[in-house]
């Protein structure tokens, strides 16, 4: 792998040495990096102090050693059970930012550079000591000139350039792996890195977090039991975010909640209700509801914080995920297989029979459990792990939702162990099941399918051209010579024609039923049931009759009935 043409050679060397030092030198060998960096081979041979640890533990330590970019990469990978083996997934979920805060002088310089004025002209007061520090930025308390208490999030100096450099390196390595390694071709690592790259770059721009908070605040504006902090857009930029400070008791202090007189079970129900409204009704949700991002105000309202990670689920995606949930709740393997194949990207290597068998085996462990005995988040994760094992790549929006449900379920269990997320889901699941059969949902599905069919149709000439061009260059060596095939095909032709003749009346009836339903749908969409000034049903009847007569005539003329 020729990396010498890149300006990031020094960073490549740092990464390669750390990879070898943590016992992953074989990956460097597969990628051809040991020949280009001879010192890596010596490092891999001489430093084996970490080899007594598991591969998952070594990977977590490696990411910490490589810095904030790779820590964030690992945290995002921990949301992808469809791509990461189970042992690594569990270890990555333990990744925590371990970075020191940066000095106030640097924070003040960033504020002035981003907002165009010194910090003391924007804020009446500003705490020099940060409340918290993370890989991307740190948070300070401040006060606006009108005495409004706010919190100010400031991006870490140089982190944007560093992360962009590391992401470029990861993408180049992933593309090489796609071309030259089996696992790269199977899991399309470059697509994974590009997906994570987009997520990281979005999180680096604090204007995205501001937009997320504003959107969720607008979606929940009619609720009086939740607080979404106000965003001060005039004091916000790509590297500075100013948000209303809301006081409350955080969820990671459950005893304090109880001491303040709050009912923990009631709080848990409220949290689930608000989260399910965001997920299943609004289709835009806070995707990181861990205890540190949740609080209860003095008057009992729920407070959400940190909107850097959100999930998005458009209507068709929500319906696909509903099938998955219904399959889990009803222990229905067929429904689960159908939902997985609908929502995932399936390679040609997938053995659907084996997939069905493994899903049935997974469901067996839930068959004897009462509904409240099902851990919904864990079940979703296990299904996504099965997808990984069968080389089905699940889109990020589903895995983010799965991770969100797991986090939410953990919070509910800590607050009120007697409550079960799967039972609290039932009212929403019923509503979603009814929504799938509604006219707007059917209309949206038909529109999407028509769009996909149109895209396929218009791309067909290009695809055929590519196939013919490749055949012209490489040839088409496949030849068959089997003298009895004509007899076999003639026999099959007769059998098929007889079958066609037998079911014409049934097909004709089904056509009429379809036309009746279709006319209802068209009437719902356009308000009319006319086609070229003819009633749709009559026009369809005439067309279906002509087709049936033509088919019978063709069969009889061939003499193969």
Image (cartoon, grey):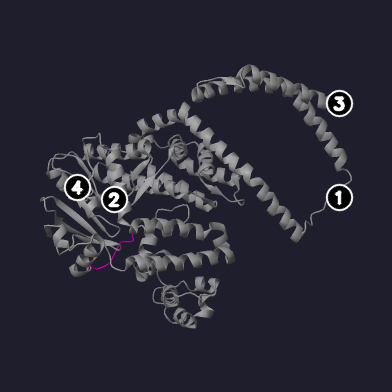
Q: In the rendered view, tell whether residue 129 sits above or below residue 270.
A: below
Q: Is residue 156 visible?
A: yes
Residue carrying label 2:
210
Q: Which residues are magenta?
A: 94-101
At 57% across and 41% down in the image, what residue appears? 452
At 54% across and 43% down in the image, what residue appears? 341
Q: Quadrant of the C terminus?
A: top right
The Cα atoms of the two marked residues, 1 and 3, are separated by 29 Å
SS for tag 4?
helix
Residue carrying label 1:
481
Rate crowding at label 3 as few (under 14), some (14 to 19) or many (20 or more) other CA atoms within 10 Å. few
The Cα atoms of the two marked residues, 1 and 2, are separated by 68 Å
Rate crowding at label 1 as few (under 14), some (14 to 19) or many (20 or more) other CA atoms within 10 Å. few
Residue carrying label 4:
254
Q: Mark number for residue 557?
A: 3
Q: Who comes first in sequence, dot 2 or dot 3?
A: 2
Q: Who comes first in sequence, dot 1 or dot 2?
A: 2
Between circles 1 and 2, the one closer to the viewer is 2
Mark 2 touches mark 4? (CB < 8 Å)? no
Between circles 1 and 4, the one closer to the viewer is 1
Q: Who comes first in sequence, dot 1 or dot 4?
A: 4
Q: Mark number for residue 62?
A: none
């Amino acid at each position: 792998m020729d990396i010498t043409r890149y300006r990031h050679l020094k960073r490549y060397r740092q990464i390669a040495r750390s990879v070898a030092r943590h016992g992953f030198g074989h990956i460097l060998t597969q990628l051809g990096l040991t020949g280009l960096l001879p010192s890596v081979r010596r490092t891999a041979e001489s430093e084996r102090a970490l080899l007594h640890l598991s591969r998952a533990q070594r990977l977590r330590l490696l990411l910490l050693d490589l810095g904030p970019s790779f820590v964030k990469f690992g945290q995002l990978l921990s949301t992808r059970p469809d791509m990461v083996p189970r042992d690594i997934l569990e270890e990555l979920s333990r990744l925590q930012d371990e970075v020191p805060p940066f000095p106030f002088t640097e924070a003040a310089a960033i504020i002035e550079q981003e907002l165009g004025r010194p910090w003391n002209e924007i804020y009446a007061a500003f705490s020099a000591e940060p409340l918290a520090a993370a890989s991307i930025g740190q948070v300070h308390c401040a006060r606006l000139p009108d005495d409004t208490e706010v919190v100010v999030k400031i991006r870490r100096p140089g982190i944007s350039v560093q992360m962009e450099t590391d992401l470029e390196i990861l993408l180049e390595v992933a593309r090489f792996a796609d071309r030259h390694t089996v696992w790269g071709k199977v899991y399309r690592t470059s697509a994974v890195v590009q997906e994570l790259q987009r997520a990281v770059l979005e999180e680096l721009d604090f204007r995205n977090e501001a937009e997320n908070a504003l959107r969720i605040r607008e979606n929940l504006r009619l609720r009086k039991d939740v607080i979404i902090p106000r965003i001060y857009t005039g004091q916000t930029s790509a590297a500075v975010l100013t948000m209303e400070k809301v006081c409350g008791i955080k969820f990671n202090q459950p005893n304090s909640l109880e001491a303040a007189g709050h009912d923990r079970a009631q709080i848990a129900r409220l949290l689930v209700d608000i989260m399910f409204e965001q997920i299943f009704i609004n289709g835009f949700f806070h995707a990181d509801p861990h205890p540190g991002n949740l609080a209860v105000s003095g008057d009992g309202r729920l407070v959400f914080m940190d909107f850097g990670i959100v999930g998005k689920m458009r209507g068709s995606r929500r319906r696909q995920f509903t099938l998955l949930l219904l399959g889990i709740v009803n222990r229905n393997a067929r429904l689960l297989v159908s939902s997985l194949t609908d929502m995932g990207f399936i390679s040609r290597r997938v053995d659907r029979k084996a997939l069905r068998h493994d899903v049935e085996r997974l469901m067996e462990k839930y068959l004897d459990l009462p509904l409240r005995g099902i851990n919904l988040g864990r079940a979703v994760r296990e299904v996504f792990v099965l997808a990984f094992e069968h080389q089905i790549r699940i889109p990020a929006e589903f895995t983010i939702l799965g991770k969100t449900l797991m986090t939410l379920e953990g919070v509910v269990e800590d607050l009120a162990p007697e409550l079960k997320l799967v039972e609290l889901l039932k009212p929403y699941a019923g509503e979603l099941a009814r929504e799938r059969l509604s006219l707007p949902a059917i209309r949206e599905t038909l529109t999407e399918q028509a769009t996909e069919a149109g895209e396929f149709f218009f791309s067909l000439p290009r695809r055929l051209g590519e196939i013919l061009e490749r055949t012209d260059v490489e040839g088409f060596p496949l030849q068959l010579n089997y003298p009895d095939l004509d007899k076999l095909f003639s026999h099959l032709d007769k059998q098929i024609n007889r079958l066609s003749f037998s079911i014409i009346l049934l097909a004709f009836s089904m056509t009429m039923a379809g036309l009746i339903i279709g006319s209802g749908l068209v009437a719902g969409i356009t308000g009319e049931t006319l086609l070229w000034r003819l009633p749709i049903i009559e026009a369809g009847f005439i067309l279906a009759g002509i087709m049936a007569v033509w088919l019978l005539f063709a069969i009889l003329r061939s003499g193969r009935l």
